[in-house]
Amino acid sequence: MTLSYIPSDTNDEGILKATASGILPNGKPVIVNADGTVSVAGGASQSIGSTVNFNAGITDTPSSVYDANAGKIVIAYRDESNSDYIVAIVGTLSGSSISFGTEVVVDSVPVNANNPIVYDANAQKVVVFYYTSTGNSQKAKVGTINGTSISFGSSTQVTTNRPESSSATYDANAQKVVYFFVDAGGFQNGGYPTAIVGTVSGTTISFGNPTAAKNAGSNYLAITYDSNAQKVVACWQDNGNSNYGTAAVGTLSGTSISFGTLVVLQSAEIENTTATFDSVNNKVVVAYRNSSASGRGTAIVGTVSGTNISFGTAVQFNLGVTRFTFAIFDSVSGKVVITYQDYGNSQFGTVIIATVSGTSISFGTPVVFEAASTQTPSLAYDSSNGKVVISYRGSSNYGRSVVLQVAYTNLTAENYIGMSTGGTYASGSTATVKIIGNTSNEQTSLTAGQAYYVQTDGTIGTTAASPSVFAGTAISATRLIVKT
């Protein structure tokens, strides 16, 4: 008897119809998501694009953010080559590269470094904070992106006195901006870690009254928003307690903020504090330089419960002297990205990828993103492209940016269900998937009798990847019997 191929395309038992999440190309491996939708299996390996200058002049403390409404990156910085003005520039991602529009002056007054920038998702605007020695004033301006340019409204005074350290975040629940700063001149008698709530209306911002998290001197401030707890988490070096790393949970009510119990995150002197929120694991990650341990790069995981926060065990990610730490969460890969200046490696700009598990954190292999002395890196996550933009003061003291693709895959050992068929499906449409026992006829260059495995980038190959997922067996150059 001759073995013949009988297609099972018409067998309803070998067909699954489901809603596509994202574009679903024809003839590709398909996974099922937790909500019952289906997506193309895929991913990417880690890569770093080419470096681009956003300012070919002396650049101080660039701060960056992603404007989700405009789909653009905005960088604010002090331009020493332009009268020490605070300026901003708009960046556009394309693949692994970024291009920039023309520099725009935020305020025509000389400013000092330390200029946080934050995106207000409700107002769909960015807010830039800066300090000018003219009148010893901290100010803020609201920016609106138009194409590859940005314009700013009138300035608002936040408070007087110079901020030795500052950070900003957006509280999505309260729909408010939170500015966290230290007054060198002294709100309530001197250098307290202080927060103030801002409300954006049109192209201006107004503020409530400042609130101190603790009546003691502080430095190296950081603040982030916990979208699970709907709270902000503030971190700082507590000068009143041996310079230990300290944190507190902040709750917004109107234009006011209150803080819960202060918690020592590590009984060590910390510097260069940065904080971000891991929305996959619902954890806060704080990274810093541990000056009590020879300046080593260190990170720790925090869990918010009510108005309190608790921390796991601190883990070192760099055994050399570490400076200018900055962290951000990449939601596509589910990883935390940390950049820093590796003082023990010629002060090169370095990035490391961190994975949170419970209350602990582990790290991949560090990668140099600029083989030159690099200072004050800032990170922005472009959620539309699933990529991180690193902006920093690099070679020749220029302002420079580079695009980081963090390795990821949506493939697990269990979620592969079959191969798409019937054309390309738009996100939200009803897609057809050939599942176990059916035959995918849309393949090319297969070898009959060969087993094929789904790769982490969504292709199929003859070698098992990690995780090992068996796609099926080829019966011709174009046909694959689907198996799971």
Image (cartoon, helix red, strand yellow):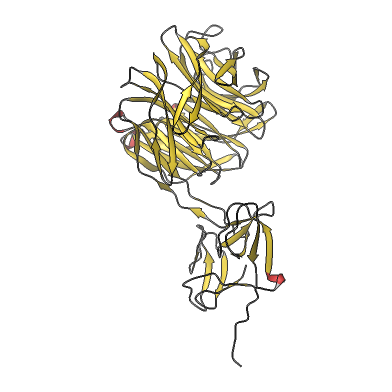
Q: Is residue 249 left or right of residue 362?
A: right
Q: Residue furthest front?
A: 146
Q: Which residue is nearer to you in this view: 306 or 1?
A: 1
Q: Residue furthest bottom?
A: 1
Quadrant for the N terminus in the image: bottom right
Looking at the image, how many numbered discs can be counted on the residues?
A: 0
Q: Quadrant of residue 216?
A: top right
Residue 209 x %, y %: 61, 12
Residue 94 x %, y %: 43, 44
- Examine the rendering and report whether any part of residue 458 can be seen: yes
Residue at point 66%, 35% (across, down): 228
Q: Is residue 154 left or right of residue 392?
A: right
Quadrant for the C terminus in the image: bottom right
Residue at point 53%, 15% (across, down): 240
Q: Is residue 350 above or below residue 412?
A: above
Q: Quadrant of residue 468?
A: bottom right
- Examine the rendering and report whether any part of residue 220 can be seen: no
Residue 364 x %, y %: 46, 46
Q: Which residue is nearer to you in this view: 461 or 205?
A: 205
Q: Is residue 422 above or below residue 54?
A: below
Q: Residue furthest left?
A: 396
Residue 425 x %, y %: 60, 57
Residue at point 48%, 69% (across, down): 462
Q: Which residue is nearer to you in this view: 224 or 299?
A: 224
Q: Is residue 222 above or below residue 20?
A: above
